[in-house]
Amino acid sequence: MALTLNTLKPAKGSKVKRFRIGRGEGSGSGKTSGKGTKGQRSRSGGRNKLKMKGIRAMLLSFPKMRGFQSRYLKASTVQLEKVSKAFGSDEKITLRLLKAKGLATKSATRAKLVGGNVDKALHFVNVMASETAKAAVEKAGGSFVLPKKKSGSKAKSAKKTKARA
């Protein structure tokens, strides 16, 4: 027999007829149509889809994100001895100069001097310092100029309440 378009058929056993559920007793699957007896899943539209049931066990298996991380960047710590080697006497030192010399990190928004000895008079502008570093700089004849702190929201709200009363 010649192979032509009208004689093409799939291979024996490659196509299996779908089991049709819910088509009555004549379908060959009996009175309950192959859906068991009664209950939610035997009815049309009856079956709750996936739900987050074992969520507690899942949550317990996750790694614990412990602690607290501040959203503010920490000040870059700078050794006072390194600053005294990098700068000359009576120089005004700012954060920009500390970054340029490589003493503070490039991404730093603030810098803080940490203890040590100084033999020169260094003047720091907008640079924080520990108590020991501040004492050492002032002993050598240096100084610190820090920006004035902005008045807090509590002070403003107190003024507003007085004005209203």
Image (cartoon, rainbow, N blue to C red):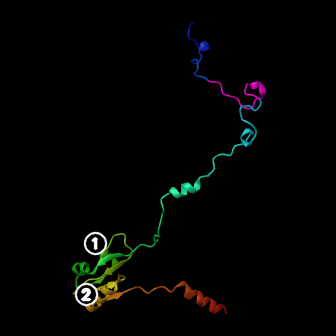
Residue 164 is inside the magenta segment: no
Spot the residue most to the front: 37
Q: Position of residue 150 (x, y in %)?
A: 48, 85
Question: Are discs 2 and 1 less than 8 Å apart at CB?
Answer: no
When asked about the image quadrant of residue 137, the answer is bottom left
> Could you tell me which secondary element the residue under label 2 belongs to?
loop
Q: How many marks overall? A: 2
Label disc, if present, on residue 90 of the rendered structure: 2
The residue that disc 1 covers is 102
Magenta residues (range): 16-30
Q: Residue at x 58, y 17 (%)?
A: 12
Q: Nearer the viewer, residue 142 or 65?
A: 65
- Amino acid type assigned to the residue bearing label 1 in the image: Gly
Dot 1: element: loop
Which residue extends farthest top?
1
Looking at the rendered image, the quarter that the N terminus falls into is: top right
Which residue is rendered at x = 34% and y = 79% of the image?
112
Q: Residues within 10 Å of mark 1 (few under 14, many from 20)?
A: few
**Percent position (x, y) of residue 90?**
25, 87
Magenta: main secondary structure equals loop
Name the residue at 52% across, 85% down: 152
Residue nearest the observer in this picture, 46 or 100: 46
- Seen from the viewer's position, the closer of residues 53 and 154 is 53
